[in-house]
Structures are given as structure tokens and as C-alpha cells.
Amino acid sequence: MSNTKSLLTIKNLHASVEEKNIIKGLSLDIKPGEVHAIMGPNGAGKSTMGYVLSGRDGYSVESGSVTLDGEDLLEMETEERARAGLFLAFQYPVEIPGVSNLEFLKASVDAQRLARGEEAITSANFLKEAKAACKQVNLPIAFLKRGVNEGFSGGEKKRNELMQMLLLKPKLCILDETDSGLDIDAMQVVAAGVNSQRTEDRSFIVVTHYQRLLDYIKPDFVHVLSDGKIVKSGDASLAQELEAQGYAWLQSEPTEDELEG
Amino acid sequence: MSEWLTGAIARGQGISDWLAPKRAQALELLSQTAWPTRRTEAWRYTPLRSVERSIAKDQVQTTGLSPVDIADLHMTELVFVNGRFDVQQSSSELPTGLSIVLGSELNNADQALAIEQFSSIKPSRHLFGLVNDALASDVVVVAIAAGADIEKPIRISSLLSSGAEAHTRVQVKLGDGAKATVIEDVQAQGDTLSTAFVEYDIADNARLEHYRFALQTNTNVAIGGSHFNLNNKSKMHSTIVAFGSDLSRLDTDIIHAGEFADAKLNAMYLLDGKELFDLHATVEHAMPNGTTEENVRGIVADRARAVFNGRIHIHRDAQKTLAELNNRNLLMSDKAEINTKPELEIYADDVKCAHGATIAEIDKQALYYLQTRGVSRSKAQVMLNFGFINELIDLMPNAALAEWVRPIIRERFAQMEVK
Amino acid sequence: MTEQIDKALAREYEAGFVSDVESETFLPGLDEDVIRRISAMKDEPEWMLEWRLNAFRIWSEMEEPTWAHVHYPEIDFQSISYYSAPKSMKDKPKSLDEVDPELLRTYEKLGIPLIEQQMLAGIAVDAVFDSVSVVTTFREKLSEAGVIFCPISEAIQRYPDLVKKYLGSVVPTKDNYYAALNCAVFTDGSFVFIPKNTRCPMELSTYFRINEQNTGQFERTLIIAEEGSHVSYLEGCTAPQRDENQLHAAVVELVAMDNAEIKYSTVQNWYPGDENGKGGIYNFVTKRGICHTNAKISWTQVETGSSVTWKYPSCILKGDNSIGEFYSVALTRGRQQADTGTKMIHLGKNTRSTIISKGISAGKSNNSYRGLVRMNPGAQGARNFTQCDSLLIGDQCGAHTFPYVESRNPSAIVEHEATTSKVSDEQMFLCQQRGLDPEKAVSMIVNGFCKEVFKELPMEFAVEAGKLLEISLEGSVG
């Protein structure tokens, strides 16, 4: 496997939000078809990583490099990264009243197909695909006509994210705490959806606080992110270890000054 | 006083017909009214230069103007061409329970009633309402009998050809428990000046669904008003869609004259070029237990200007009123301008009233979300702008009308340059 | 409930006494000659007299504004006396020992001791009695820091260059009717100058008192905060209980240079008139500040007095990144009418403004918020947030909101919200169930309603404001 070309390579990435350093020397290499879990305590920079990789305004890269399929990701606009195959499933998807889900999905798919030089999909075919995707993630067809995420429950929003992933067929999916706020049934639906999309050339970064989700989406690698960098990597068993121990061990021993202060 | 107004008064004095006593009253008030300046609160942001420039022309005779088709929608047509009621184009076969008659052709008793009704709902503070009182060619009286449920929408079209000046006037009366849909539409070509006023009396338990489309082109001066009197347990739902023009001004008055009345007003304006649109929406809660909900949204591009004044007045007796007004605006260019003034005037304590007004950029989070899905920034902006308005289109009770106006608005978006 | 409100409305106005001070008062009337005499009384230089006369000519051509939501009989400007001063002030007392003891007693009765030893350390007071400043405390301590705090009449003599440069620079003479009148006839007021990079070592405070009958008070305040300086200024006002209406038309100008900060707090408790609306002060005031780059002006006002209030403390946010704030509590009862609010004029980039207005109406009063937020084309990235809340107590009062929002910059964001509510039965029930009497419950609820504003007041004032509100509401709900 080591001969295979990398899909995503992050080298010594430093990034900040509102002049506060959050990512402090992150390195990560992901090959096609791999599933990497990123775990870590609150405030470690897990969500920030997704925002930085997708190019959100206000998140600035100080140093380091990121390539996707050999292309410099950091040079691209947010939408160009998406078209290059990067998909971020949000922890808290935003509501966009007045813009229908279907219109939104069609615009996204059209933009991406155009960018890849593919032929435009006809409305009829698209509707067929969208309906199938709805079914697969257990969302009523009527949701296609509603405003994007408008009035959706937490679980419905997550499934809507998954549906977008099914339609956009990205190369790299970043699932940002997709399990948060889901009950066990909903989580299984999401996991099944993700698993159905696992292919030889599609990779996943599964960001999660708990090991629970990883029972359903089996990672090839588990990384512990703490204070903006990866402090430990291992296989799936590391997740279990973390579940048992928590993250407290990550905190360095307090100095005497701190104890007194 | 402006030359234009002096001329209008002179023309009004020359008319003698069944409306004479009302016209005289209006002329008397007009002669005491100062021509608005920037210091006149009701015209603070809306200069009347284009009215002053306009010169009254002789009646322009045109044929070949007819109201546009709205797919899937059969309507009872009430057509004015250059201000004159057009019998040929207006529907002659009417559903049971609906009557449409010219005021001048009413029998004495009904005419007396029509005179009594005339300007009883439209407040006299509207300058151009007074002009319309004095100059309206006639009054079309629309009556819906008690208990009648008129499914077919009634459309009042005012068609104008270049050079026309027109003053149209309609009275609509819904009897007890009656139901009806009324669409007001102005379609103008070239340079025109029009005033179009409609008064609605909505009796106990009656329901009115109302639309006003002001999709005129930019060289029109279009001034008008829709005035509603709500009696006990009556309901109204009004939707206004407006593009601007040289001067486009609409005054709406919703009067809760009965208890437990319910009013909804959704208005949207999309302005481009050097257009101006000015909406003055007043709600008077004179009786207890009424509810009002207003949603007003606008997008202003290029050098256009939007003016909104939303006044909610809760009178001393109007306890247990619920009233809410929300005005949201997007400003698209450095040269565009928005002036908004939501007002509350409250004299009763056991009420719930709120208003909010925002002027903002597009929601950055939503923009980012769309971009992460591969949609370009400019396309995302258009989608979000359209979505902002589309929410109100979705609230239109008449689906056929919504589907008719949606692509018209889409096209307008395509024209409005996103800067 | 109504009965209890009535009881509350009949409460005594505690500052309503008249001081027995022998005064020299002009006969009522206003013409150029009166202005010359005012100027002469103050030994003013020629330029000042010219400035006044010019203002008088401008005023004579102006019309009284009618747009405010207030109603009062026409004011006869010829029936007002434009100058009144305690006789004892004629020879200008050099120290507190020379001040008429009756004057000192007046301020003591009002809770404003002027004897420095008795004062709370940290507040310097300028006491203005009718048309003149009677005493300014802690002047020496302030001058050590380079701070000038003196009556404006004295500043005209001693710092003519500063006065010439800034007087009328924020509120031009022809700004409005009452401002123009003030320019013509102002008699005294405070002058503050904070030098560069100086933090004023103590709170500054002016206490205004109208005593004489038929006089107007026309004070003028000018505060200049040089680059990087900081000052907190407090203002309080009372007047005797009289059957006639009296006019108070003040002008306050604030200049905050780059990186400077001015905090201006007012507790206004002029005589509000009796329950039938007889008597009381007409409080027609123009207050405005200009903010240069990175500067900040914060207005906080607690308005409980006056029969008619017409007042809009405003900020011109000229410099980039400058900040304007307006925090207001206005309480009206009896027949009081208040039309008050603010104007935030955003000219510079990234300017910010916050408006928090709390109006409480009781009795047969009318309370209006009137505000303007304007985003000019240059106000790139500017923001405003406005929250106006009204609380109605009883069903005979009125609460109104008239906000003007104007934007000409697509990157500017304006948010305005207004709500209205009453003290709910549920709230009252909860408090009473927990053992509070209705009066305490209402004052607690109202205090909670005003909390956001009170927390902006300097400590001593916050306590005074809370008490004032409590007294005003005594027994107002049952």
C-alpha cells in the first residue's frame, strides 16, 4: 500500500482563527480508500481542521502545505476544493430558508460536473437520483422541496448531509462529528450510508469525540488530535483504549507554578 | 404648490357627476395641502420630481392593450385601459354572488351607498388618494354577497399606454362570511402616470385573499393604495410584489374595525437601475383581540432606492392585540439606498407587539455552505438572494399565481447585476 | 391596580422645595438688548457677543419643531427671564467659605454636598444654580493632572482659543430651534478639557438646579478629550415644584479625538409637573458628540423627570473604528411626555454603534423612542445593533417607537428590534408567592427590565438611579 500515491497530504500545518493559533503543526497522509478517524478532546482543533481544509473565510493558514491528489489545496477557493473532490459533512449544517433542497443539490451537482468536464445531467435523471438518495438515507421525498435544512431535526440534517455526499460522489469526505446528537438508530443509518460509499479510491476522515461511531464505521487508522497536532496514531484498537481512558492523559503534568497559581 | 397639483385641481373642478359631493370635499382638502417636500414626513425619502415633470395629456386612445394571461388561472376580469373601464375586455358573465357595476350606473339607493363608502376606508392623509378622489373617471363597485364563496379570482387590471395619465378607483365589498380573491395589477408601457386606489370592506367572518403586483417598467410614475377595513372575525391575506420605477409609491392601510380579525401582509420589492419603490404600510388596531403579521423583504441593486414605512398603531381599546412586523433588506451596491422606518404607537398595555428591521449582507455561513458543495460564489449569492424572496413566494396561498410570478422574479434577478 | 397607580402618581417630588436665595433676575423678554446684557454680565469678549447675536438672528428666523410625539401649549419666549443669579455670586466667591450658606444647604438637601471633606472621594462637582456656576470642587487636584474643569463662562475668559475652536463645532448654531436659542442666551455650564493621553483622575460631575420662578435654564457644556484621553462625566438635575412650566434648553458638545473615550451619564429628575400635568420642566436638549479615529463616546441616561422631554444624545462616528453607545431608561408617569432617543451617524469605516433603550410608561403618560441610524457610503463594514423595549404599566399610557434606519453601504449591517410588554400577572404571582409585596415585586421587575442600562452607570449613579426608579414606581401596581 505504501507505493500508492497519497490522496491527501497535510504537512506541518499551522492555522489560526481570529489571530488565535488552533492548528499547530498538523501532519497527516491519507491514501485512496483509507478511513482515518480523528479523535480528541474538545478544543483540540478537530472542527477547525475541517474548516481550514475546506477554505472557510476567517481561517487562515500560517504555514505548512496541503495537497489533494497532488494539487495544492490551499491555493483553491472553497468551491474549487469541493469540485476537486473534497466534501465536508458539517456538525451543524446551516439552514437556508427559501432555497429548496432540490435546487441546491442540482446547482451543486451541475457545478461539479461542469468543473470535471462531465456532461450536464438532465433534470429528470437528477430527480431520479435525488429520490434514490433520499430513500437510501431514509429521508422523505418531500424534503427535496423544503428549504435547505429548514426546520429539519438534528438527525434529518445529518442525513441530508449524507444524501449530498451520495450525490456529489467526492474523493475525500470529512465527517465532522456526524454522530453528535444522534440516537443509536440514526447513527446506524448514517454509518450504513457511509459504509455503502466506501470504495477503493474514496477516503474518509471521521472526526469524532466518542468511539461509538467507530463500532459502525471501522477505521483503518486512528489519530489523537490534541492542541492542534496529532499526538498519537494507531489502528482501530487505539479508539477502544481512548474510550476506556478518556483524554485526561493528554494533559501534560501540571507544573508547580500552575498548581500554586 | 406644484404646477402639476394646480392643474389636477383645475381638472377636478371641471368634472361634475354623481360623485360631485365627494370630489368637492377632496378638492377642498387638496387646496389646503402643501406640496410635499423633504420635510413632509410621508414623503421624506421620496421626491416628487417625476410627478412635477409630468404634464397632463389629453386622453391617449389606444387599442390592443389586454391583460396578460396567467397560466392555469381563470379569472373574472375587470379591465381599465388608460383609466377608462373597458366593458369589452371585462368579464360579463359573473359567478353567482358576485356583481361588478360602474358607480354611475347604479340605482339611486346603491349609488347613495357607494357615495357613503367612497373614501370611508382610505384615510384622507394620502395626497394622491385625494387626487384620485377628484379625478377618478368613475368607480367600479365590486360586491360579493353574504356567504358567497367566489373561487375564481377577480383581477383588476390597469393597462396604460405610453403618454397616458390614468386614475382608477374600485370599491370591493365582501358580505358576511363571503370569500374572494382579488388581484390588483398595473401594466404600463412607456411614460405614464397613474393613481390606482382600491377600498375593501370585509364584513364579519369574511375572508379576502389579496394580491397587488406592481411590475411596471422604469419610466412609469405609479402611485396607489389598497385600504382594508376588517370587521369581526374577518381575515385577510395580502401579497405585494413590486419592482420599482421612476416613482412607485404604495400606501396600504389595514384597519381592525372589528374584534378577532386577522391580517397578514407579505410584501417583496426587487429594485434595479435607478428605480424607486416606496411602501407605506399602516395597521390600525382599533378593536381588541386582533392579530397582524407583516413580512416585508427587499433587495436593492445598482442605484435603486427603497423606502419602507411600517406603522402599527394600537388604540386604547385594542387590548389583547398581537402584532408583528419584520422588515429585512439586502443592499447590493455602493450606490443603492435603503430607508426603513418601522413604527409602533401603542396605547393599550395587554398587547404583544414587536418589530424588527435589518439591513445586511448575505448570510456568510450560508454562502460558505453552498461553496463547500462546489457552487461558485456569485451563483451562490444569486441563489441566496432569490431564496430570501422565494420564502415569501412560497407563502402565497394561490399556487398558480405563485408559479406565474416566480419565473418573473427569477428573470428580474438575472437582470439585477450582482456586484 | 389602577387605584394603586394613582396613589403612586400622587407621590411627592422630593426635590420640589424652593431655596430662599436673593437673586438678581432679568425681567422676562428676549431681544438683542437682553443678549447684550447677558454678555455684559459675564464680561464676555466681543467675539462671544457677536456669536450670540448671530445665533439670535438665526433663531428668530427659525420655526419651532413639531415632529416630536409631544403636545404642549405654545411657549411664549417673551415671558421667560433669561438670566437669574444669586446676588451673593456677584463678587465671585474665591472659595467655598465665601459661598452663601443657603446655596450650600440647597445642594446638601439634594444630597450633593459641596464641602470637599464631606464628599465621596473621586467626584469633582460643578454646581450650576439657575444661570451661574456657584462652585466647582477639586479644581486644584484636577489641574495637577492637567485637566481643566470649570464653568464655561470662566473658560471663555481663560481659554478663549479652545472655546473658539470647539464651541458650536459639533452642534452648529442653526442645528435646531432650541440649540439656536441656547447659542444666543446660554448663561453657564461646564467646560472640560482632558489633555493628551491622560486619564481623568476622578469622575467629573455637574449638578444643575433651577430655582427662580419664570426663568429658563440654558446651560452649555463642552467636553474635549484629547488624543488617547479618558473621562467619565456625570450630570444631575432638579428644580422646585412650581405651577408654571419652565424651559430648560441645554446644549452639550463632546469632542473625542483619536483613541479618546468619553463616558457621559445623566440622571435627569427635573420637576415633572403634578398628576394633572400642571407645571414641570420642558426639557428640550441637544446633546451630540463627535468621535475621531478609534474614539468612543458612550451616553447613558436615566430620565425620570420633566413634563416634556425632547432629547436625542447622538454620536457622529467620523473616524474609522470609532464606537458610539446609547443606553437609556426613560420612565414617564402622570401626564409626562418623553420623546427621546439617539442618532448614530456612521461615516467612518468599521464604525460600531449600540443602542439599548428601555421605556417605561405609567399613568397617563406617553413615552416615545425616536432614533436614527445612518450608514453613509463611506461606512464600510459598519455595524449597528438597536434594541428598544417598552414596558406599559396601566392601560392609560402610551409607548411608541419611531426608528429611522438609512443605509447607503452594502457592507454595513443594521439590526433593529423593538418589543413591548407589560408586567405580567405570572411574574407578579411568582414574586408574591415567594413573599414579596406587590410594590417590591414591580420595582424588582422594572429594575430587571432596566438592568442592561444601569450596569453602564458609574456605581454611585446606578444606586441613585435604582432608588429614583423605585420611588417613582412606589405602589404603582397591586
Image (cartoon, coloured by chain):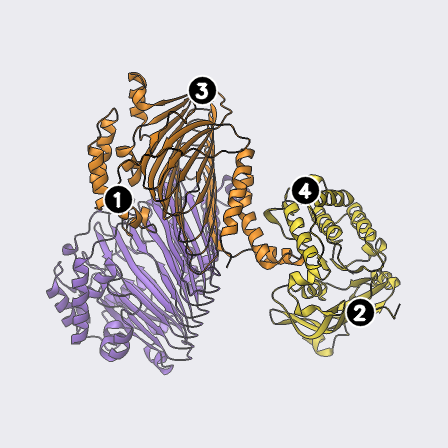
Circles 2 and 4 on the same subunit: yes
- Indicate the chain on which mark 2 is placed: A
**Distance between mark 4 and mark 3 Cα atoms:** 43 Å
**Distance between mark 1 and mark 2 Cα atoms:** 76 Å
In the rendered image, is residue B141 in sight?
Answer: yes
Relative height, residue B411 to residue C198 (above, below): above
Q: Nearer the viewer, residue B319 or A131?
A: A131
In the rendered image, is residue A90 in sight?
Answer: no
Point out the frontmost of discs 4 and 3: 3
Name the residue carrying label 2.
A29
The single residue placed furthest to the bottom in the displayed view is C144
Name the residue carrying label 4.
A143
**Distance between mark 3 and mark 1 Cα atoms:** 38 Å
Q: Nearer the viewer, residue C465 or C297?
A: C297
The chain in purple:
C
What is the x, y in percent for residue C233? Answer: 37, 68
Name the residue carrying label 1.
B55
Q: Colour of chain A?
A: yellow
Q: Nearer the viewer, residue C193 or C56?
A: C56
Q: Amino acid at mark 1?
A: Ile
Q: Element under label 1?
A: loop
Name the residue carrying label 3.
B93
